[in-house]
Image (spheres, rainbow, N blue to C red):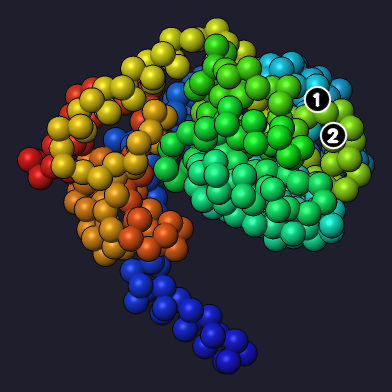
Amino acid sequence: MKSHLKHIEQKLSNRKSENAFRELKLNDNLVDFCSNDYLGFASEQEIHAFEPAQKYGSTGSRLISGNHLQTVEVEQFLANYYKAESGLIYNSGYNANMGLFSCVAQRTDTIIYDELIHASIRDGIRLSNAHSFSFQHNDISSLEEKVKNAKGNVFVAVESIYSMDGDEAPLNDIVEVCKKYNAALIVDEAHACGIFGEKGEGLIVQQKLENEVFARVVTFGKAYGSHGAIVLGYKSLKDYLINYSRPFIYTTALPLSNVLTIKKAHQFLAENKDRREQLLELIEYFKFRIQGLKFTIVESNSSIQCVIVPGNKEVKYLAELIQSNGFDVRPILSPTVAKGKERLRICLHTFNTKQQVDDLLKVMGGEL
Ligand SMILES: Cc1ncc(COP(=O)(O)O)c(C=O)c1O
């Protein structure tokens, strides 16, 4: 036992010496510039305090006792909402990506993914038996080079909005490369859905590319203020996942109340376009205001705005200074991002005010 603990403690001490030790913190009433609750839906009573016709918890996996008529109906409602043929709900975005990528490609196939792709997709790829290669972030020639030389059926994985940078994938160009080499495109829309598109359907629908993608992953723990995710795609993909996707098969289904909350959040979103418009206006305001300051920023039109502060120690110091002034901004450290690319990740929300943005930028610029 002693040697086991010694190994664990050594690893922890490495993290501490690299200033990369992770700790769970309680939120202490600071102004929220860090959560994924972009539209304020997490505290929206119309979404969470409704009275479902049937209150029911989980009793088993979807394949045993955890399937309900309402769940099936919500899946089809969501497929229609996102203009897809069908959809399969997973317990989280992490599970959805693990579940999809671990089984979609066979041993002789290849998955090509953007180098900044989310950990859940990397972990899914790791579990699959397929060949896999990364391409340079948002670089079409790098993507083409990799796809051209890939073996078997080729899958390409991207995010429409990247979680740690907030920037957008050049989806039209990616679709062209995929078409040219007959590759199947899979797009994670975790940070785009709820925000972009006429009803918040995400960038794929906004750019009318829904018929060009093999699958999409939409998560409900971010703009929707709920929990869970859906994989959207062909009916045969849904049937395949029900048969082969272990993170779907071997887990207890989401409780019905959660599933109904997801539907409620979509209905609320469709009826409250002003929420999205308010957010988009605040994003523009932030971008305009930060221009005048001498920061290295990642170009982004999304609610995720990043300021590069190289070095774990340096970015942690600045984040703590900002927090002590009342704003909850979190540092993103290496190894979560590459060394030298450590950053402050500022998330903008409908409920943030322009005054709060001004005050935050004053603190960052050393004025307060
Ligand atoms: C791009 C992306 N995909 C998937 C996930 C996982 O989603 P969830 O938090 O629902 O597990 C996240 C969130 O961390 C994400 O940013």
Picture quadrant where residue 200 is located: top right
- Give the residue pinned by disc 2: 238
Q: Which residue type does callout 2 highlight? A: Lys
Looking at the image, can residue 54 be seen? no
Point out the residue furthest to the top here: 271
**Residue in the picture at 38% in, 19% down:** 280
Indicate the quadrant containing the N terminus: top left, top right, bottom left or bottom right.
Answer: bottom right
**Residue in the picture at 34% in, 76% down:** 17
Q: Which residue type does callout 1 highlight? A: Ser
Which mark is first along the chain, 2 or 1?
1
- Give the residue pinned by disc 1: 86
Estimate how packed mark 2 is, as few (under 14), some (14 to 19) or many (20 or more) residues with alpha carbons within 10 Å. Answer: many
**Residue in the picture at 73% in, 44% down:** 155
Kindly state the secondary structure of the residue where label 1 is placed: strand
Pointer 1 with pointer 2, Cβ within 8 A: yes
Q: Spatial distance from mark 1 to mark 2, Cα to Cα?
A: 7 Å
